[in-house]
């Protein structure tokens, strides 16, 4: 029996660098899209907010990726 661990799901990137690089490219492109949209919304609705559009974009992408890991592990 294979031990179950969230770490096993996350750590495959070390054995598949091509997959890791493709994921990084896709996630970075998604963060860039989010950042543009967030920057527009921030300028319109919260121009004085202390957070950056990029930091919120990375946060959103992190939450999405965490949800995917949980979904795949289940």
Image: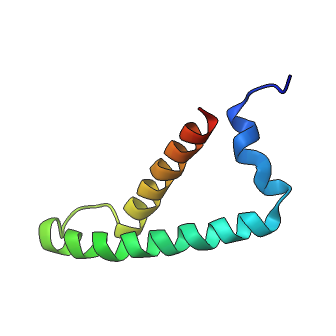
Residue 68 on image: x %, y %: 54, 46
Look at 59% across and 32% down and name the residue there.
74
Q: Quadrant of residue 42 in the image?
A: bottom left
Looking at the image, residue 52 sits to the left or right of residue 11; the answer is left
Looking at the image, residue 16 sits to the left or right of residue 26; the answer is right
Q: Quadrant of residue 35 in the image?
A: bottom left
Colour mode of the rendering: rainbow
Looking at the image, residue 56 sits to the left or right of residue 31; the answer is left
Residue 70 on image: x %, y %: 56, 37
Position of 61 relative to 26 (above/below): above
Look at 55% across and 66% down and name the residue there.
27
Look at 81% across and 65% down and name the residue there.
17
Q: Toward the viewer: 70 or 56? A: 70
Residue 31 on image: x %, y %: 46, 69
Look at 62% across and 73% down and name the residue there.
25
Q: Toward the viewer: 35 or 20? A: 20
């Amino acid at each position: 029996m294979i031990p179950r661990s969230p770490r096993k799901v996350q750590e495959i990137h070390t054995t598949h660098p091509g997959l890791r690089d493709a994921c990084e490219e896709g996630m970075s492109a998604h963060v860039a899209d989010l950042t543009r949209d967030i920057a527009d919304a921030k300028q319109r609705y919260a121009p004085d907010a202390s957070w950056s559009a990029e930091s919120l974009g990375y946060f959103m992408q992190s939450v999405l990726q965490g949800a995917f890991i949980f979904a795949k592990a289940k």
